[in-house]
Image: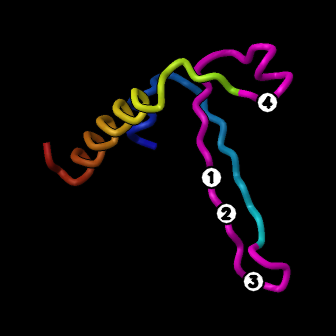
Amino acid sequence: MGGLSKTVKNVSYNLVFHLSPEKKNSRQIHWHIEIYPITKSWSGLERGYGIFLNDISPEQAAEKLGASSRKELANLVGIS
């Protein structure tokens, strides 16, 4: 989250929890959390169909988030 919050500044987030049991008779549960920054207001397409449009390519987003996350990790472990 540190890298994400430094890359996408002053923005709210939606946290989406996905839970599903692996088997009905199993005690194991598969789960994960997805974090979505709210970077713009919803348009009709997003509201009506649940389709979200990105203003940035996946490659650009990965590059920015990767660089920011590496800086955050370096600061946490004391490497500057």
Question: Which quarter of the figure is the C terminus placed in?
Answer: top left
Q: Residue at position x 25%, y 40% from top?
A: 71
Q: Kindly report the distance in space between the C-alpha atoms of the residues bearing marks 2 and 4.
A: 22 Å
| Residue 27 disc label | 3
Q: Which residue is mark 4?
A: 50
Q: Earlier in the sequence, mark 1 or mark 3?
A: 3
Q: Kindly report the distance in space between the C-alpha atoms of the residues bearing marks 2 and 3.
A: 13 Å
The amino acid at mark 3 is Arg
Q: Kindly report the distance in space between the C-alpha atoms of the residues bearing marks 1 and 4.
A: 18 Å
| Residue 33 disc label | 1
Q: Kindly report the distance in space between the C-alpha atoms of the residues bearing marks 1 and 2.
A: 7 Å
Q: Could you tell me if the residues under marks 2 and 3 are in contact, i.e. CB atoms within 8 Å?
A: no
Q: Is residue 20 left or right of residue 74?
A: right
> Residue 68's image quarter?
top left
Q: Which residue is mark 2?
A: 31
Q: Earlier in the sequence, mark 2 or mark 4?
A: 2
Residue 42: x and y, percent?
Answer: 73, 18
- The part of the chain drawn in magenta is 22-51
Q: Which label lies toward us, 2 or 4?
A: 4
Instruction: Decide: few, some or many residues near mark 2? Use Cα within 10 Å; few <14, some 14-19, many ≥20.
Output: few
Q: Which label lies toward us, 3 or 4?
A: 4
